[in-house]
Image: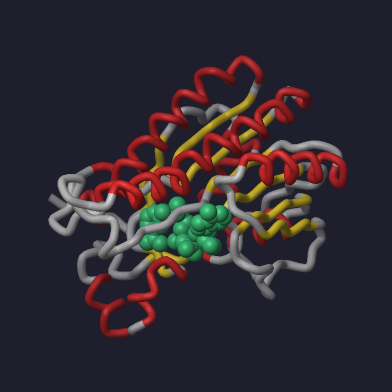
Amino acid sequence: MATSSISFDFKGQVGLIAGAGGGMGLAIGNALIEAGADVTLIDVKPKPAEIASGPGRHLYVQGDLTDEALVKRAVADTVTRFGGLDLLANTVGVIWFGRDTSAIDMDLAVWDQVMAINLKSMVITARHAVPEMKKRSKGAMVHLSSIQSLRGDIKVQEAYGASKGAIRSLSKSLAIQFAAENIRSNCILPGFIHTPMQTRMDDPATKTKFAEFVPLRRIGTAEDIANLSLFLLSDAANFITGAEFIIDGGRTALP
Ligand SMILES: NC(=O)c1ccc[n+]([C@@H]2O[C@H](COP(=O)([O-])OP(=O)(O)OC[C@H]3O[C@@H](n4cnc5c(N)ncnc54)[C@H](O)[C@@H]3O)[C@@H](O)[C@H]2O)c1
């Protein structure tokens, strides 16, 4: 799958993609594999058929990213198989319309689950990936937040929004802590992107309606996110850390 007219060279580098069973995670994983990186992909879903065939190698781990033992094992297997770890893309996330509602009356068990999947999973992957990056004196991470973290919503998904705000804070903190060791951390804030999370966009009429709210007049693709992610993970971005990137076709620029 061609993802960009910019060509990146990630030969000799090793990546871990958390939430790579579809959508943005799979697109980032495929773009890295096509650019020569060896990549471990983790997701609770079974292995997707569309994983790129190379030139980079891949390892697929099916499991729950809130399970620290699973992540620890996946990082160890990555290092054994590919020789180290340089890159982390944290793309896991759930938005539970209807169940994730107002903080005032939502089920707090749902709050805890969303926080565990969307936020704690990113803490877990970072705490096992960073020590490996330190060994190589080099590393780069991207974490998927959302434009939802910039504002409130009339139809609230309070746990989702709060988790996405916390990811921005976590990313900056990681950036500062590990900058001296040449490990970078940046955050991506997408707008509407057509992925398995947004099945409502499968309906062409709905997709067109949502696109009317976007100055560039289209809904984003997983490849749009992969393009930005590869740039941020690459040496071309080696002076960029602790930063946030809105990628929404101009949606949040509107008054
Ligand atoms: N699609 C959008 O419009 C949009 C907008 C803003 C932000 N985002 C964020 O971008 C990121 C990627 O989303 P996407 O649109 O590619 O959605 P997606 O649903 O295709 O990808 C998320 C992946 O996370 C996996 N996952 C969920 N819980 C898991 C768990 N406990 N353990 C392991 N894997 C688990 C899912 O199986 C799925 O493959 C998410 O963090 C999402 O919140 C998406």
Q: Is residue 17 left or right of residue 158?
A: right
Q: Is residue 46 left or right of residue 250?
A: right
Look at 77% across and 24% down and name the residue there.
Answer: 135
Q: Indicate how the structure is coloured in the image.
A: secondary structure
Quarter occupied by residue 42? bottom right
- Does 150 sit above or below residue 27? above
Whole-percent x and y of residue 216? 30, 64
**Viewer-closest of 7 and 10:** 10
Look at 72% across and 67% down and name the residue there.
Answer: 52
Q: Quick one: quadrant of the N terminus?
A: bottom right
Evaluate whether residue 227 shows in this view: no
- Does 66 sit above or below residue 167? below
Extreme residue toward the top, this view: 180
Whole-percent x and y of residue 123? 53, 35
Evaluate whether residue 247 shows in this view: yes
Total numbered circles: 0
Whole-percent x and y of residue 219? 35, 68
**Viewer-closest of 22 and 218:** 22
Quarter occupied by residue 49? bottom right
- Does 24 sit above or below residue 48? above
**Viewer-closest of 73 and 26:** 73
Q: Is residue 69 left or right of residue 121?
A: right
Look at 33% across and 84% down and name the residue there.
Answer: 204
Look at 13% across and 56% down and name the residue there.
Answer: 154
